[in-house]
Image: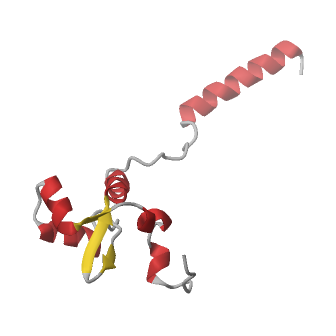
Amino acid sequence: MAKHPANSFFNAIEPNLFSEERISFIELAKREKVHVVTVWRWSLRGCKGHRLESMVVGGRRYTTLPAYERWLARINDQTPRPNLGRTPRQREADIRRAEKELDELGI
């Protein structure tokens, strides 16, 4: 695949989008039982801050089923969240256990 400038539209697209089997917006709309304008909106405006990945081939707009599934996961927040750490209560309990263990060891 050719390299594109850093600010290129192509860098915003998932790299494997072009290697995945494409599906037209009309086909996706029929599959999901929504109006084709809804699929266009998902691609152009996005939903919950995430746009559906798409490409134009021969004047027609396409996406892929894997891209649609990735988009669904993002808008439904099914991405793994980082461990936010312990609650203050858990932290205090850990400190008490550590202090008790140190006392038992005479440290």
Locate the C terminus by quadrant: top right
Say which residue appears at 33% left-offset and 68% top-offset: 51
Residue 54 image point, x, y percent: 33, 71
Q: At 50% across and 76% down in the image, what residue appears? A: 11
Residue 38 visible, this orientation: yes
**Picture quarter with the N terminus:** bottom right
Check the image and report above or below for 53 versus 99.
Answer: below
Name the image quarter holding residue 3: bottom right
**Residue at 36% over, 55% down:** 66
Where does the image place residue 91, in percent across and percent down from the top left?
62, 33
Q: Is residue 76 left or right of residue 88?
A: left
**In the image, is 78 to the left or to the right of 104?**
left
Nearest the viewer among 26 and 99 is 26
Disc tally is 0
How far from the left and from the top, in percent, is residue 90? 57, 30
**Where is residue 46 shown, x and y percent of the image?**
28, 69
Most extreme residue toward the top is 104
Q: Quadrant of residue 25?
A: bottom left
Between 18 and 78, which is closer to the camera in this rendering?
Answer: 18
Q: Is residue 66 above or below residue 26?
A: above
Q: Is residue 11 left or right of residue 37?
A: right
Picture quarter containing residue 83? Answer: top right
Task: Give the residue at the far right of this rendering.
Answer: 106
Residue 13, relative to residue 73: is it above or below? below
Q: Residue at x 54, y 84 (%)?
A: 4
Residue 45 appears in view: no
